[in-house]
Image (tube, helix red, strand yellow):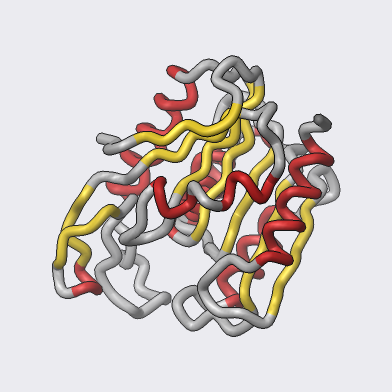
């Protein structure tokens, strides 16, 4: 299911960071982020989603973890659940097949939605979850499908306050759902759009150092 795969860092590392890209992008688009994090001791794995037609983009084929059928964020059929579950299963299988035994699950936009979806349900403890400019999907099954293995897993949420593609209220909604007494969740936002800036990269690097000390 997954297309090209980029690995950066230490191929023998026990700790890996699975970094999932956004709609229409690829693992290569996120690769320039890795040097800014200054963690050559970790293994960064950057897969590319399968190419599929995306309804809101006039049906053009592009790398996408799932289709988006409408711009109406209140439509319960906006994101096909079968696409999301298949993407999460493929990422989970990739984690199992790679060398690291401990994982940080991270993603931007669509990739962040898959990271949150999988982390909520994953049966093995993760070191952390990173959600960048993203939102929740398949919210109606969250309670029924929650796995306590990650009840205390720390999470980092970052968003642009000027983001028109994924409005910040979606990110705050996801953060509020994740932020519990058991779990340390951090929220940061900057006056930017649907993007990543240098202050955000510095924040991510500091957070990675907290949860995976060099």
Query: Does any portion of residue 118 appear in the rendered image?
Result: yes
Q: From the top left corner, tell me how far across and down residue 42 is, in percent.
A: 65, 29
Picture residue at 51% right of the left edge, 73% below the top: 194
Picture residue at 48% right of the left edge, 54% below the top: 113
Q: From the top left corner, tell me how far across and down residue 172 is, in percent.
A: 66, 69
Picture residue at 63% right of the left edge, 68% below the top: 197
Relative vertical location of residue 63 with respect to residue 70 in this rendering, above or below:
above
Picture residue at 69% right of the left edge, 53% below the top: 178
In the image: residue 118, left or right of residue 186:
left
In the image: residue 87, left or right of residue 188:
left
Name the quadrant of the C terminus.
Answer: top right
The image quadrant that residue 137 belongs to is: bottom left
Q: From the top left corner, tell me how far across and down residue 61 is, in percent.
A: 16, 59
Q: From the top left corner, tell me how far across and down residue 73 is, in percent.
A: 41, 75
Query: Does any portion of residue 149 appear in the rendered image?
Result: no
In the image: residue 183, left or right of residue 170:
right
Relative vertical location of residue 178 with respect to residue 8 in this rendering, above or below:
below
In the image: residue 191, left or right of residue 139:
right
């Amino acid at each position: 299911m997954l297309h090209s795969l980029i690995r950066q860092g230490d191929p023998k590392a026990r700790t890996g960071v699975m970094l999932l890209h956004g709609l229409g992008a690829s693992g290569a688009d996120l690769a320039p982020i890795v040097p800014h994090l200054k963690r050559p001791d970790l293994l960064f794995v950057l897969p590319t989603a399968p190419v599929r037609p995306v309804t809101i983009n006039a049906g053009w084929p592009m790398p996408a973890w799932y289709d988006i059928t409408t711009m109406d964020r209140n439509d319960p059929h906006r994101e096909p659940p079968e696409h999301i579950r298949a993407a999460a299963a493929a990422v989970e299988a990739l984690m199992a097949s790679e060398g690291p035994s401990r994982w940080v699950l991270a993603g931007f936009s669509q990739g962040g939605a898959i990271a949150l979806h999988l982390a909520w349900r994953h049966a093995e403890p993760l070191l952390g979850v990173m959600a960048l400019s993203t939102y929740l999907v398949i919210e109606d099954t969250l309670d029924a499908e929650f796995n306590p293995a990650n009840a205390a897993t720390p999470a980092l949420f970052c968003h642009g306050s000027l983001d028109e593609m994924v409005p910040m209220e979606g990110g705050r909604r996801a953060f509020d759902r994740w932020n519990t007494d058991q779990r340390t969740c951090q929220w940061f936002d900057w006056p930017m759009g649907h993007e990543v800036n240098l202050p955000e990269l510095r924040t991510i690097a500091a957070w990675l150092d907290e949860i995976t000390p060099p």
